[in-house]
Amino acid sequence: MAYLAGMKLIYFAWVRERVGKPEEDVDLPAGITTVGELVTWLAGRGEEYAYAFENAKVIRAAIDRTHVRPDAAIAGAREIAFFPPMTGG
Amino acid sequence: MAIRLQREDFDLAAEVAELTRGRTDIGAVASFTGICRGDAGMAAMTLEHYPGMAEAEVARHVQEAEKRWPLLGVTVIHRYGRLVPGDNIVLVVTAAAHREPAFAAAEFLMDYLKTRAPFWKKEERAESAEWVAPKGTDDAAAERWAEPKRPPQAAE
C-alpha cells in the first residue's frame, strides 16, 4: 500500500489541546487527497483525535501557511495546520 | 509597511512618529488600538498565534489595503502571550495624504485581523480558562469589504 510520507501536521488553540500535542509528522495512507479527507482520517486515529475533530465544520485549515477550504488538494503540501476559527485583533 | 508580532508592549506615539518622520506628503494618520478588557471577572488573556503564517497573513492584507487605497505608510503590531486587563493587544496605524483612505484602511485591516489572522484568545477567570468563541458580527464586518472597492477620489 502506498503512503504519502513525511507530512507535518500542526495544531493550534483547542485543537492542539484536544489532540494533546502541538505538531507531529505523519505518513498518510494513499487515497487521502483533500484536507476534508485528512480530517476524516485524523478523527479515526483515537479518542483524542475524535474529540478534536468531532465538529469538522468548525475546523479551519492552512496548507503551507495559506488558508484553504476542505476540498483543497494536499498533494505537495509540506505543512498542514488545523485550528479553530480565529479570534485575533 | 512595518509588521511586528511581539510579546512586548508598544507605544502609539513612537509608532506614529516613526511613520511620519521626515515626510511632508502625509496629511492624515489614523490609528486603532485594541485593549484587553476586564469583562465579567476576566483575570488574563493568552494570545496564541501561528508563527510565520500570522506575519504572512497580515502582510497579505496590508498589500490588499495598499491596492485599494492610496496609502503612504502602514504599521501593524499584534502582541501574543499573556495579557491582563488594561494591556494593549493590537495597533494599526495608517498614513495617507487625506483622511478617508487612512480611516478606511485602518478599519479594513482590523476587520480582517479579527477573522483571518491566525490568532486565538484564551480567557482566564478565577475558576476556568476558555477559548474565546468567534463572533458572527466580526465575520459580517469582514465580509462587507469583500466587494472590490474603487479607491476613493481625491478629497480634502
Image: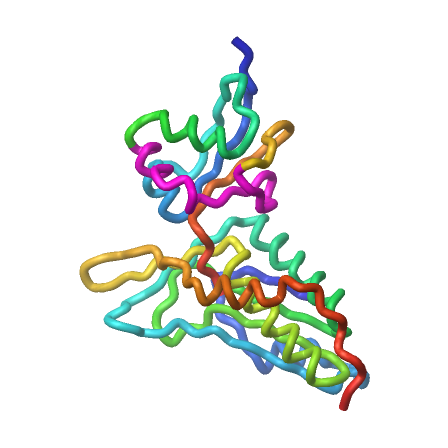
Nearer to me, B123 or A29: A29
Q: Which residues are magenta?
A: A48-70
* Residue at point 36%, 59% (across, down): B132
* Residue at point 65%, 60% (across, down): B61
Q: Is residue A7 left or right of residue B129?
A: right
Nearer to me, A63 or B44: A63
In the displayed image of the protein, which residue is found farthest to the left? B127
* Residue at point 24%, 63% (across, down): B125
Q: Is residue A49 magenta?
A: yes
Give the image location of residue B115, x and y in percent. Answer: 51, 59
Nearer to me, B51 or A89: A89
- Res. B79 visible in picture: no
* Residue at point 32%, 40% (across, down): A18
In the displayed image of the protein, which residue is found farthest to the top? A1
Q: Quadrant of residue B128?
A: bottom left
In the displayed image of the protein, which residue is found farthest to the front? B147
Q: How is the image coloured?
A: rainbow
Q: Is residue A52 magenta?
A: yes
Give the image location of residue B143, x and y in percent. Answer: 57, 63
Identify whether B126 is placed above or below A50: below
- Res. B40 visible in picture: yes
Q: Is residue A78 left or right of residue A25?
A: right
Q: How many marks?
A: 0
Q: Quadrant of residue B77?
A: bottom right
Give the image location of residue B74, x and y in percent. Answer: 68, 71
Give the image location of residue B56, x and y in percent. Answer: 63, 52
Identify whether B63 is placed above or below A78: below
